[in-house]
């Protein structure tokens, strides 16, 4: 035998064994795969059979029920509380007091065609004499609203029960004390008689030449 022939025979024998072992391994893998697919086919056939037994309506109902079931809210998520309408806000600011009723019975209407008595504004110490639409300073202001010192007035009549004007200042020539006499002028304005140079006659009767307004 030639050198190396024995070794070559051994290699060929070993190669044949390896090929045979590979073929056996491939056959074994094919068998296992076929078994797996067979099992899967059996499961699918069983499911299809169940569908056939239950019928499409039952399967559809199960699927619909599963779709309508809401997912539960995760734990710890606060549930929103229903909205509550807030009451009308309360304010501590008191309502404005109702306006005081305006005095009635007098106005600033002119008195045309009446006899008048001339008089002069005096003793105002340069401030002038304010005029109103009634015999008190609670009435609206007349127009003009002030007569300056030494202004000549045209008196139509007097009331002797108007607002009392108190004068406690010792001004030479001016009446000192409470004086409730008011003069109505021909333009409808009213002025306190305390600051006019008419005679200061006490009582209910005006000085000569000036009538009571109730008689006009």
Image: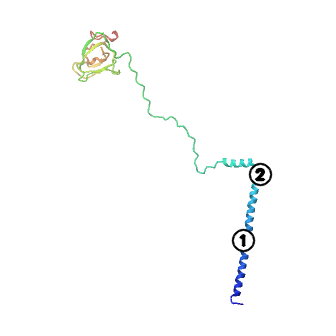
Residue at 69% over, 86% down? 7
Residue 177: which numbered mark, if any? none
Q: Residue furthest left?
A: 172
160 relative to 96, above or below: above
Mark 2 and mark 1 in contact (Cβ < 8 Å)? Answer: no
- The crowd level at tag 1 (other Cα within 10 Å; few <14, some 14-19, many 20+) is few
Give the percent coordinates (x, y) of residue 196: 26, 17
Q: Nearer the viewer, mark 1 or mark 2?
A: 1
Q: Is residue 6 left or right of residue 165?
A: right
Farthest residue in the front direction? 2
The image shows residue 2, relative to residue 58, as above or below, that is below
Farthest-out residue, right: 53
Q: Secondary structure at mark 2?
A: helix
Residue 183 or 19: which is nearer the viewer? 19
Local packing at callout 2 (Cα closer than 10 Å; few below 14, some 14-19, many 20+) is few
- Asked whether, in this view, residue 146 is left or right of residue 98, the answer is left
Nearer-the-camera pick, 156 or 58: 58
Q: Position of residue 5 (x, y in %)?
A: 70, 87
Q: Quadrant of residue 45?
A: bottom right
Location of mark 2 (residue): 52
> Which residue is under mark 1?
26
Question: How far across and how far down the image is residue 146, in percent?
Answer: 28, 21
> Where's the N terminus, which quadrant?
bottom right
Q: State which tag comes first along the sequence, 1 or 2.
A: 1
Residue drawn 74% across the image and 65% down it = 34
- Among the 4 quarters of the image, the one containing residue 119: top left
Horizontal arrangement in the rendering, residue 216 relative to residue 35 (left or right): left
Residue at 76%, 53% in the rendered image: 50
Which residue is painted at 74% across and 57% down in the image?
44
């Amino acid at each position: 035998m030639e050198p190396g022939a024995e070794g070559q025979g051994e290699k060929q024998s070993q190669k044949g064994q390896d090929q045979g072992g590979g073929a056996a391994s491939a056959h074994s893998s094919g068998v296992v795969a076929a078994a797996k697919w067979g099992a899967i086919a059996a499961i699918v056939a069983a499911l299809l059979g169940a569908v056939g037994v239950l019928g499409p309506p039952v399967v559809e109902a199960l699927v619909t029920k599963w779709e309508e079931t809401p997912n539960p809210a995760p734990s710890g998520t606060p549930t929103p509380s229903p909205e509550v309408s807030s009451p009308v806000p309360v304010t501590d600011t008191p309502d404005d007091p109702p306006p005081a009723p305006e005095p009635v019975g007098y106005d600033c209407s002119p008195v045309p065609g009446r006899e008048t008595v001339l008089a002069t504004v005096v003793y105002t110490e340069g401030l002038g004499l304010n005029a109103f639409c009634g015999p008190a300073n609670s009435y609206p202001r007349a127009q003009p609203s002030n007569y300056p010192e030494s202004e000549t007035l045209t008196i139509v009549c007097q009331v002797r029960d108007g607002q009392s004007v108190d004068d406690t200042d010792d001004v030479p020539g001016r009446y000192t004390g409470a004086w409730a006499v008011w003069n109505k002028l021909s333009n409808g304005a009213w002025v306190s008689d305390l600051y006019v140079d008419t005679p200061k006659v006490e009582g209910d009767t005006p000085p000569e030449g000036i009538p009571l307004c109730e008689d006009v």
